[in-house]
Amino acid sequence: MPTEFEPGPEVPAEAGALVATLRAVGWRVTASRYDAQSFGNWFVDLERDDRAIRLVKDRSQFMIEGQTDELRAAGLLKPFDRLGSFCEAVVAWVDKQGA
């Protein structure tokens, strides 16, 4: 079994708890990137079964990209200005999906 990808230290400082929650229900980190010179933007790619999502921080806004219909139905196809609100919405979506 391959070793899971570990995001750099800058990403866990903001989204570590969210990534840990997703990992606990079977999501696997496949890639991440942090760009200190571009507003501290980052992304984390995760996969579970046949699904993939990307958590994104872009210019101090937080977003999720992936299965558009599911995300639209969950009210997640919008930027969030607050990390806490973003994390709560993503966790609620994941909880509805089941472990």
Image: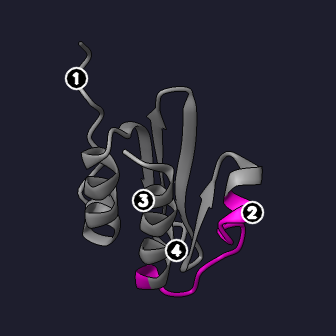
Disc ID at residue 95: 3
Q: Overall secondary structure of the magenta stretch? A: loop
Mark 2 and mark 3: span between their CA atoms? 16 Å
Q: Secondary structure at mark 1?
A: loop
Q: Earlier in the sequence, mark 4 or mark 2?
A: 4
Mark 1 and mark 2: span between their CA atoms? 32 Å
Specify few, some or many for label 1: CA neighbours under 10 Å numbering under 14, 14-19, or 20 or more. Answer: few
Tell me if residue 79 can be seen: yes
Q: Secondary structure at mark 2?
A: helix
Q: Which residue is mark 2?
A: 72
> Three-letter amino acid code at disc 3?
Asp
Mark 4 and mark 2: span between their CA atoms? 27 Å
Disc ID at residue 3: 1
Mark 3 and mark 4: span between their CA atoms? 31 Å
Q: Nearer the viewer, mark 4 or mark 2?
A: 2
Q: Nearer the viewer, residue 40 or 51?
A: 51
Part of the protein shown in magenta: 71-84
Q: Nearer the viewer, residue 8 or 56?
A: 56
Can you give x and y, in whole percent of width and height, for residue 66 in the image?
65, 47
Q: Tell me, yes or no, whether the two marked residues, 4 and 2, touch with CB atoms within 8 Å.
A: no
The image shows a total of numbered marks equal to: 4
Mark 1 and mark 4: span between their CA atoms? 30 Å
> Three-letter amino acid code at disc 1?
Thr
Q: Is residue 19 left or right of residue 62?
A: left
Picture quadrant where residue 18 is located: bottom left
Mark 1 and mark 3: span between their CA atoms? 25 Å
